[in-house]
Structures are given as C-alpha cells and as structure tokens.
Amino acid sequence: MYDETPTAEIVAAAEAAVPVLAAHSDWGERHGRLHDDAFAALVQAGVPRLYLPRQLGGYAVDPMTCARVTEILTRGDPSAAWYVMVFNAARLMAARWPAGLVRRIWGENPDTLIAASGHTPLTGERAGDELVVHGRQRFVSGCHHAESMMSPMLIDGTPYFVVVPMSSCEIVDNWDTLGMRGTGSNDVVVDAVRVPAELAAPAEGEPALNEFYTDTLYRCPSRVVFATYVPVAMELARGALDVLTELAGNKVPYASDAKLAARGLAQSHFGKALATYRAAREYFFAALENVWQAAIEGKTFDARARADLYLAGTHAMQSSATAFRHVADAAGSSATARENPLERMGRDLETLRHHGFANESRYASVAQVYWDIELDYPLLLR
C-alpha cells in the first residue's frame, strides 16, 4: 500500500542540500545554532521523514540508507548532519507510543521537529486531565527550531516520555563548546508547564507497535538510531584522510627539504588511520545490515543482539576519533591552524567522542550485558 521511496532519490536529495549547508556552516559555528536556510534545506531534502512511518508521509528507510545520508550531509556541515538524529530520534521512539499521540504530533505535518533529550528526567504531577511538568533538560539539540521537546519524565517514580511545547519552555543558551557548535544543544527549562495527559506515554514495558508503525524498520532494535549520528564521526575521519593526502603532496615540514609525503612517520600514521577508519565503518555497516536482515526475517532481538549494536556504534565513534589522531600526528602543526580544515574537524570529533550514548564507557555497557550484571545504559536507549 505504501510504496518505498527509491534510495537513489533520497541520496540525491541529500547531495543537493550539501552546498546550502556548507554555505551556512560558519554562521552556525558563530551563533551556536543552525541557520534557518540550512534548516530549510534539510527539510527540503526529506531528512525529517527518514525514520517516520510511510503511513504518516515518511520514508521508513533502512538504517544503512539513513547512515549514508548522514555521511553525505556531513560533507556540508557536521552540525547540520546531526539533525538527522535531531529529527528522527523521537520518530523512532514513538513506535510504541499511543497512536493518538503520534497522530497529534505528525498527523498533519510530517516535518514537525520534536527535539529529544534523555539526559535528565523531568518531574510530572497529575492535575485532573493534565500534567504539571517541572525540570531542566540538557543537551536539547535543535531546540531553537523545534516545535516541542520530548523528554523522559517521572511521575511518582514511574518513568514516562512527555512532549512539551517549546513555546512554554525557556531555552538557556549555554551551548558554548569546543566543537559541533551549530547543533544548538542548549539546556531547556520547564517551569510548571501544564500539558494534556495524552502528551505522555509510558516508558516501561514493551507495548505493541501502534497502528502507524508497520514497516520493517520498527522491528529493529531502537539502537538503529545510531545510523542517524555515528556516521557524522566516520565521515569526519574520512574527510580528514583526504585533507592529509592533499597536505602530504604540498607541505614541506620545518627543518626539512622534502615534502611531508616522503616522511616515514607520516606514511605510517596515514596507513593506521586508513585501516582504523575502514575497519570501523565496515563493522558498523555490517552490524546495521545484519539487524535489517533479521528484522526482514521476523527474528526477535535479545539483550545481546541489542548490545552488539551498542558495540558497533560505540566502536565506530571512538575509532573515528582515533583515526583522526593519527591524521593530526602526521599533519603536525597544520592540524591546529584555523585556516586548515583539520582544525575544525578535530574540534568536532573531540566533542563527538564524548557524547553520552557512544562514549568510551559504552564499551563497559556491552560487557555488562554479556556478563549478566546490572546495565548502566539509560532506559531511553535500550
């Protein structure tokens, strides 16, 4: 009933957006948020619909296609590519929300942005057919462009997800970071905001998929959300290798009469970086493909299957940063010069590798699953 959108068209739309994103990338760096024209280019490219059900006007693409789109957009602006996650994280989580809530959010406008963050649960209190919501949520990427914010919330100790209109919230412009500045991942304060009770959904248990979420994508573990942001780091690593290759053919290092390309140390670091990047990317895409094939076959995913996705995503993120460090060691002082693209790439990757959902501690989360001990991975991500 719902025709699949051809992958080639989705990829072409992403490629068409790259020049617009690149043109406004420096503006986003300076202002700590995405430029309106860059945001509009993402919407035009169909980014909000990648993980949205076809019944709601979305594409429900396979995670490999989503990852490829994320890589392409990164070439224009890594912060803009981060919006693949900003747009689609809530859409993926909504698979098990009540159908009425899903219809209310995206029924009339498939491109509506619900910014999501799972850092700190808000607090809710029941007041008749409303909820009174309090708290401060951190790292709300895209909050300046969002219509609402999705956050975990506790009511008498019971976890829920709640959707709060941004018009009722206060944005605290405190996203002053080393890299990824254009994501606008500020704090958002919710001060006794009253919302209809139907804007909340239980977070515990495993309710059935609602009537909109019938596509293969939603039979995958929720960790396929990794395809919306881990590829930003991978593409930065790949781009850094390209910059180093160009630099090697032109730079004559200090106290040398030969180009950088002739230095054995630079050659060694390039080879290590290339192997690290390629291995991590192959592993990541293979993990996505394995999950997708299992979903097609109707298989279920136990805790270890989900942990395998944590591992592939975490490893891709951390290995991308490792690959860049090899590039920087080969490039020398050029990696710290503002006029060289490596300088910003390094800042962005350093910021990305500390992200809470794919930082180094997530390796330990995998061990916790395999060793059957208490899991520290947030409920939002399991």
Image: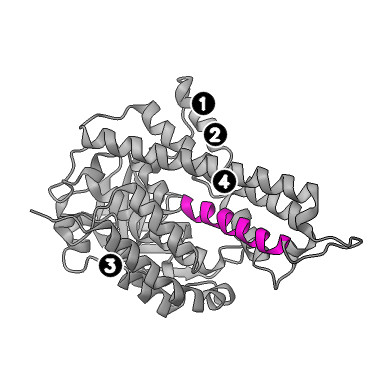
To which residue does mark 1 refer?
367
Disc 1 secondary structure class: helix
Amino acid, disc 1:
Ala
Between the residue at mark 1 and the residue at mark 3, the CA separation in whole angstroms equals: 38 Å
Say whether disc 3 or disc 2 marks the residue closer to the N-terminus.
3
* Dot 4 crowding, Cα within 10 Å, few <14, some 14–19, many 20+: many
Q: Are marks 2 and 1 in contact (CB under 8 Å)?
A: yes
> Which residue in the structure is indicated by mark 3?
112
Marks 2 and 1, Cα distance to the nearest angstrom?
7 Å
Disc 2/disc 4 C-alpha distance (Å): 18 Å
> Which region shows up in magenta?
230-248
* Observer-nearest of 319 and 105: 319
Q: Main secondary structure of the magenta part?
A: helix
Which of the labelled discs sits on residue 363, or is there none? 2
Looking at the rendered structure, the secondary structure element under dot 3 is: loop
Q: Nearer the viewer, residue 369 or 49?
A: 49
Amino acid type, mark 2? Tyr
